[in-house]
Image (spheres, grey):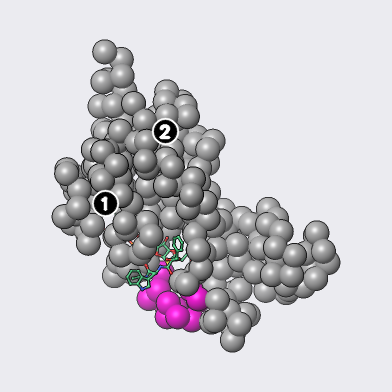
Amino acid sequence: MKIVVLTGAGISAESGVPTFRDADGLWEGHRVEDVATPEAYDVAPITVHRFYDARRAALATVAPNPAHHALGRLEGVLGEDLFLVTQNIDDLHERGGSARVHHMHGELLSALCRACGRRTEWREDLVDLPPCPACGVCELRPDVVWFGEIPYGMERIERELMTADLFVSIGTSGAVYPAAGFVRFARACGARTLELNLDASEGTPFFETARHGRASDLVPTWVDEIMERLAH
Ligand code: BJW
């Protein structure tokens, strides 16, 4: 059985990483257009760097929760028959045991050089405008995908969706495209579809089945069900 799992901010919420569109979301203290577009970065790079530097530093204070660990267990059983694509830029899936994670919106622990295009693993602040280790130019930006930019690896994602038997969406509001369109694409290609989310989302009507509750409860239960099915 080939499974594609899409995750969003809701899977990391119980680890203490704020979501984007809930009441205490990330954009509460920062207007989206101040931090999440390339145009905003051009106007105020230091503001944007401070925002992402703070989030990068906060990663050290959080840990994966049972939902991340459950997906790590599932990969251990399914191997390449599981494709995990996340909109999240944190590293909680990796720390939860998932070795192959497709970060379609980039990664906090990576810097992108605007001069040479090289992506470099990065754990320090960027606010002091350090030089790119590859070309030496001081044009490093957060390696994340902002509005108006093309998410990473779309062709690969489409290929995986086309061959999926099951598409599962976990902890995402279904408000941001192209990820919000995956459920319809997967369905059109013949996959079954399941939503696991805290409550009804914009995407809920497009799923065959939806279960609502906390990811730390829903995901381990669902993974146990799949493992049970695979064992028989
Ligand atoms: C729990 C829980 C718990 C809480 N347990 N659940 C008009 C129509 C269609 C599209 C567009 C349009 N106008 C513009 C567009 C395109 C635009 C877009 O979608 N805009 C919308 C606002 C309409 N998209 C883009 O520009 C994208 N690029 C693009 O389209 O390029 C063109 C192209 C595509 C493909 C091929 C070729 C060309 C880029 C989008 C980039 C998004 N970037 C961000 C920032 C990343 C960096 C960062 O993290 O700072 O990505 S925005 C932000 O939203 C972030 C997230 O990944 C993304 C999605 O948010 P997510 O994960 O869903 O979080 P929330 O907070 O919204 O939801 C959390 C959910 O969890 C909620 O439902 C809760 O209930 C739930 N939850 N606790 C389970 N404990």
Tell me if residue 89 can be seen.
no
Between 23 and 160, the one nearer to me in the picture: 160
In this view, the mark in front (2 or 1): 1
Q: CA distance from mark 2 to mark 1?
A: 19 Å
**What residue do we see at 37% from left, 56% from top?**
179
Instruction: Name the kind of residue labelled 2 in the image.
Output: Leu
Q: Which residues are magenta?
A: 26-37
Decide: marks 2, 1 in contact (CB < 8 A)?
no
Q: Dividing the image into 4 quarters, which one contains the C terminus?
A: top left
Between 216 and 151, the one nearer to me in the picture: 151
Q: Position of residue 117 (x, y in %)?
A: 70, 63
Q: Tag 1, which secondary structure?
A: helix
Instruction: Answer with the quadrant where ligand 1 appears in the image.
Output: bottom left
**What residue do we see at 80% from left, 59% from top?**
134
**What residue do we see at 19% from left, 52% from top?**
206
Q: Is residue 121 above or below residue 30?
A: above
- Can you tell which mark lies on residue 184? 1
Circle 1 crowding by C-alpha within 10 Å: few under 14, some 14–19, many from 20: some
Task: Name the residue carrying label 2.
Answer: 82
Outermost residue on the top side: it is: 232
Q: Image quadrant of residue 173?
A: bottom left
Q: Position of residue 108 (x, y in %)?
A: 57, 58
Q: Position of residue 172 (x, y in %)?
A: 32, 56
Circle 2 crowding by C-alpha within 10 Å: few under 14, some 14–19, many from 20: many
Q: Dividing the image into 4 quarters, which one contains the N terminus?
A: top left
Viewed as shown, does residue 132 lie left or right of 159? Answer: right
Instruction: Name the kind of residue labelled 1 in the image.
Output: Arg
Between 157 and 131, the one nearer to me in the picture: 157
Q: Image quadrant of residue 187?
A: top left
